């Protein structure tokens, strides 16, 4: 929305705030009186636009993150607390005051942004979609940046995801569920395997073990979960924050707002969703075709119902497949395909090969990536664009609790083989 502020608006503004409203900004702390005084000095007809980035219902109030443009060549990111009972603003802050503000190119806050914010407060409080976005970052090449969104005490269920970017901007996006984020900064360098960014605070994705919720790459279309299935977050769950990681393959000169639009509901879903990642290490020799394999036994007492899978490699990947392996009484392995896909296609979640498949305690889940290296150098599995990756994601639902450990890792080629280290037989070609 774009609008102009006229001098007559100042008289209305005085009624928008609680008497003790305080806005903490880079230039100091502003109470209601100081805000009105500053607004009176703004030129008549000042134009601005605003975008709601996210909203968090905390029960008695709503926390909004808003992007404001128009006062300066760059955007302003501000956060406000709205009292739901009387629709009054209680407090606000400017995250740009953090140490990495210069890196993010965030200018000072013009307090007129409070007026723009209030216009969207009441219309968005019951929305079933929220956005998490990068707040105008200017990334270097091969950088991994994270930003977080604190969840409310109200339990929510995530049921859909849509990327707000293109493959020309972001190489991939990962959405994690965390008890605590890896950093309290607005944005931080979360590429644990790549070269550190001296201008950005460095920290892991999550403060403790992360849970992968969603992944996107190569212009994959939006994902909608099956009916009655949702990722449980907030409330009494272990996921108190969402952390979005964006891998920027190339540097950018202009501020970027890559993000995700998340569909959610407060209505409890009968089936709880989770995502399992099968991943390998290893080395792809120069001028060779190689297979990278991983296999893990399900040790937890849970019945998993896979409904979607996703593959991910870099440019050397030719085929990625995942299998369910069940052993009979004669120690013969029976393989059932979960999914197989060319990783150079849009890296979306697609339906599994057999929708009635179940994975139970004692079963084995496996994945294999076939890669061809036409270069005169060995290529390691790693995080940068010059490395490779072998990832197979399984999105599943359960009737009760999901698994606590949703990662399956192997060292990969040449040190790990299905028929040797995993002692599997009847291996498919």
Image (spheres, grey):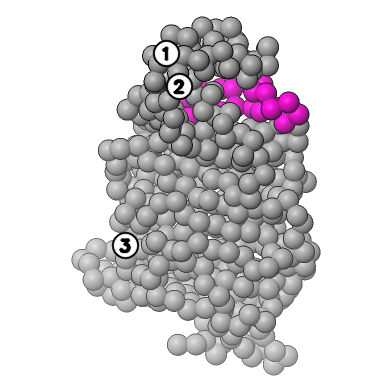
Q: How far apart are marks 2 and 1 (CA)?
A: 9 Å
Question: Where's residue 232, x and y in %?
Answer: 70, 54
Q: Do the residues labelled 2 and 1 touch (CB within 8 Å)?
A: yes
Question: Where's residue 391, x and y in %?
Answer: 47, 65
- Disc 3 designates what residue? 379
Does the rendering let one see residue 98?
Answer: no
2 vs 1, front mark? 2
Q: Distance between the residues labelled 3 and 2?
A: 57 Å
Q: Are marks 3 and 2 in contact (CB under 8 Å)?
A: no
Quick one: label 3 or label 2, which is nearer the N terminus? 2
Residue at the image point whose x is 58% and y is 46% from the top: 130
Q: Residue furthest front?
A: 8
The circle on residue 373 is: none
- Disc 2 designates what residue? 5
Q: Around disc 1, counting alpha carbons within 10 Å, would you say few (fewer than 14), some (14 to 19), or many (20 or more)?
A: some
Question: Where's residue 7, x and y in %?
Answer: 46, 14
Q: Residue furthest left?
A: 376
Which segment did they paint magenta?
77-101
Residue 335 lies, with reference to residue 248, above or below; the image says below
Residue 99 lies, with reference to residue 57, above or below; the image says above
Q: Which element carries disc 1, helix, strand or loop?
A: loop
The circle on residue 42 is: 1
Q: Residue furthest bottom?
A: 330
Horizontally, residue 278 falls left or right of residue 377, namely right
Q: Distance between the residues labelled 1 and 3?
A: 58 Å
Residue at the image point whose x is 67% and y is 82% from the top: 356
Quick one: label 2 or label 1, which is nearer the N terminus? 2
1 vs 3, front mark? 1
Quick one: label 1 or label 3, which is nearer the N terminus? 1
Looking at this view, is 61 or 254 the one in front?
61
């Amino acid at each position: 929305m774009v609008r102009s502020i006229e001098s007559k608006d100042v008289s209305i503004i005085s009624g928008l705030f609680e008497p003790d409203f305080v806005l903490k900004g880079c230039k100091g702390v502003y109470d209601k009186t100081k805000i009105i005084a500053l607004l009176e000095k703004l030129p008549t007809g000042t134009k601005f636009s605003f975008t709601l980035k996210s909203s968090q219902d905390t029960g008695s109030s709503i926390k909004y993150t808003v992007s404001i443009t128009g006062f300066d060549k760059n955007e302003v990111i501000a956060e406000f607390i709205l009292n739901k009972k009387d629709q009054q603003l209680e407090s606000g802050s400017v995250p740009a005051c953090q140490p990495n503000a210069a890196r993010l190119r965030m200018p000072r806050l013009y307090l007129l942004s409070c007026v723009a914010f209030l216009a969207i407060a009441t219309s968005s409080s019951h929305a079933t979609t929220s956005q998490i976005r990068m707040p105008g970052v200017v990334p270097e090449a091969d950088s991994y940046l994270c930003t977080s969104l604190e969840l409310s005490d109200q339990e929510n269920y995530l049921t859909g995801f849509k990327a707000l970017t293109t493959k020309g901007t972001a190489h991939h996006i990962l959405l994690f569920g965390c008890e605590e984020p890896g950093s309290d900064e607005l944005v931080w360098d979360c590429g644990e395997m790549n070269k550190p960014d001296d201008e950005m605070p460095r920290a892991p994705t999550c403060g403790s073990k992360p849970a992968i919720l969603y992944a996107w790459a190569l212009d994959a279309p939006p994902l909608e979960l099956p009916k009655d299935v949702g990722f449980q977050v907030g409330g009494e769950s272990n996921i108190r924050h969402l952390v979005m990681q964006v891998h920027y393959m190339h540097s950018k000169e202009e501020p970027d707002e890559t993000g995700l639009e998340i569909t959610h509901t407060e209505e409890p879903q009968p089936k709880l969703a989770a995502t399992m990642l099968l991943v390998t290490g290893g080395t792809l020799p120069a001028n060779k075709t190689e297979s990278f394999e991983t296999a893990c036994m399900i040790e937890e007492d849970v019945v998993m119902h896979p409904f979607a899978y996703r593959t991910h490699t870099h440019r050397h990947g030719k085929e990625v497949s995942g299998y369910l392996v069940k052993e009979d009484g004669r120690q013969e392995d029976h393989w059932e395909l979960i999914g197989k896909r060319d990783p150079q296609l849009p890296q979306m979640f697609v339906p599994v090969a057999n929708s009635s498949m179940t994975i139970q305690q004692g079963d084995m889940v496996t994945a294999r990536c076939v890669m061809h290296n036409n270069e005169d150098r060995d290529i390691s599995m790693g995080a940068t664009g010059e490395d490779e990756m072998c990832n197979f994601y399984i999105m599943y639902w359960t009737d009760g609790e999901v698994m606590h450990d949703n990662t399956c890792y192997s060292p990969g080629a040449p040190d790990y083989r299905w028929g040797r280290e995993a002692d599997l037989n009847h291996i498919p070609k």
